[in-house]
Structure formats: C-alpha cells, structure tokens
Image: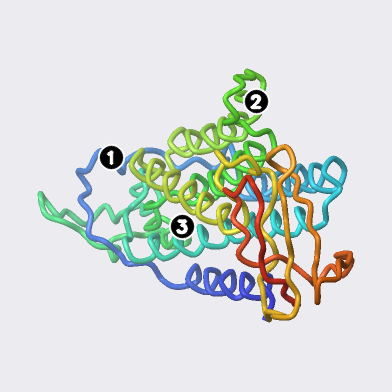
Amino acid sequence: MSEFSKIQILKAYALDVDQLEPYHRLFSLEDKTIQFPFAEKERVPMWLCAIIVVVVPFVIITFVALAIKKSMHDWHHASLGLLMGLTLTLMVTEVFKNTVGRPRPDFIDRCQPSAAFDPGLGLSNSTICTRTDLLKDGFKSFLSGHSSTSFAGMGFLSLYLAGKLHVFDQKGYTYKGFVVAAPLVVAILIAISRTEDYRHHWHDVFAGSLVGFLLSYFAYHQYYPDLHSKISDKPFTIRLKKVVPEYKAEFSFMDGSEVEITVVKNDEQLLLKDSRALLADSSSNNTEGGSADIVVL
C-alpha cells in the first residue's frame, strides 16, 4: 500500500468522525462566555481556509521542488509530508471536537432557548434549544479546526522553506527569517479571526495552533533531516525494501551537502544509474564518507 493510500485512509476516518454527533455538554444560560452573537459571515470561511492552508503551500512547494530544485523526489516527499501533517491534524481535531463537546462563544444565540424555561442558577442541556440547525456545530468549540489546519499547512511550508534556505547556517541573512516567518503570520491571522467571529474561545485557538504546528513538525521530519543539518534541503531516501549484499557503495561528501557515490561489485567500479538502487545506513552527520549497502526497491 502506497503512502498516499495510507493518508487517504486517515482522511476518510477523520471525515467519518466529523459526521458523528458531538458530546452535548451541560451549560448555564448565565454564562457570559457563550452569549456572543452568531456571525452570519466569517472573516475566513472554510473554503478560503482550505485554499490558504492546502492549495497555497502545495503550489509553492511544487514551484520550489520542480522549478528551482528540479527534483521530483523532493516534490514527492514534500507533498507527502504536507498531506500527512494536514490529515493527522484533521483527524486529531475532529476527535477532540466530538469528544470534548465544548459550547462555542455564540452558543446561546445558536440555541435560542425557550422563553418558558427558567433554570434559575442550575445547568441546562440542549433540549431547551428551539433552533436545532446550528446546534451540532455549536458543541465543537474545542479545539479550533481553522487554527489547527492553518498551522499544519503553513507550519509545514515554513519548515520546508527553512530547510531549503538553510536558515540555521549561522550566516545571519535577515531575508531568510522573513521568508520563513511569512507563512506563520498567515496562520496566526487565521487563528485570531476565529476569536473575532466569536467561533472559538482563545483556549481553543491556542490549543489548535499548538496541535497543528506540532503535527506539521512531526510530518516534516518523517521526510527531511533536522534544520540544523548541512543537508537540511535534501529529502530522505525512499523507503528501503531489500538489501543486495554483493553490491557496496563508497560515498564521500563534497562541500558538506552533495554526495558522490561509487558502486563496487567484485572490485569493479560501476555507475549508479538505476534509480531503484539507493544507499542504506548512510548518516547525514558523516562528513568524511564511508560505505553502505545498496538496496533495490
């Protein structure tokens, strides 16, 4: 099963969870934190959020990988990493939303409780609501999906650009910081808009942002080395399947990034032309060279 297929399975699971009825938590009609007005128009609607956090990073990654780096291998890994981060974030977000069941800041306006009901100082449940079309989504405040997905998509893009620019090479180019920070600023603005629309409490936004960025960080490092590495712009090799013991590869690093490979079989040097033959166990921290097994996928 391919990596893309596995990601699609996770995505399908997340969408199935979204269809479930969330937990209906008890609430107080006197709670000021859920008495904000319901915003008919959102500053960043779902369709626009999807374009910003999915399409924009994908287009930028495609341009960098294919037009600048001219590497299909890089594009493949970056695309997988982006999709993995977004899918994991979507899955975790939907699980939290449905199990926590926290009322949104605009919940009372969504609920439109019956005027005949007077709970006094007690707690109420959703049966007092006269408006039910917005009720299901009203119990999905924690955690913020806009915030988590924006930091998943833009967070991955920021890490990808940081690796390509060698932002931690200790040379101190200011423009690199601006380029890397730009996607994160976009994610922050999307997250803030959720509090301005009274769709989420600030705790929901903070938690969503943290979850999204952490999962994007995890996804990025499944396919790329640490940002402090001298080869931070190089994706990992493809998953290895079978070792061919009669082949060995001697490799040396040039300028700390490029790798020169010589394949040896029975003391005869061969050219590494078959794209299916890859190095196994070659350390990115090795700056002198060494030997490694050749594998065939």
The Cα atoms of the two marked residues, 3 and 2, are separated by 44 Å
> Quick check: marks 3 and 1 in contact, CB under 8 Å?
no
**Residue 90: where, in percent of width, then height?**
52, 60
> What crowding class fits label 2: few (fewer than 14 Cα within 10 Å), some (14-19), or many (20 or more)?
some
Q: Amino acid at mark 2?
A: Lys
Element under disc 2: helix
**Labels in figure, total:** 3
Q: Residue at x 37, y 58 (%)?
A: 139
**x 56%, y 34%: residue:** 184
Up the image or down, 21 lies above or below 260; here it is below
**Residue 33 image label:** 1
Residue 267 percent across, percent down from the top left = 81, 71
Q: Residue at x 85, y 48 (%)?
A: 66
Residue topped by disc 2: 176
- Above or below 95: residue 79: above
The label on residue 129 is none
The residue type indicated by label 1 comes to Thr
Mark 1: give few (<14), some (14-19) or many (20+) Cα within 10 Å. Answer: some
The disc placed on residue 134 is 3
The amino acid type found where label 3 is placed reads Leu
Element class at badge 1: helix
Type of colouring:
rainbow
| 70, 46: nearer the viewer | 70
| Disc 2/disc 1 C-alpha distance (Å) | 41 Å
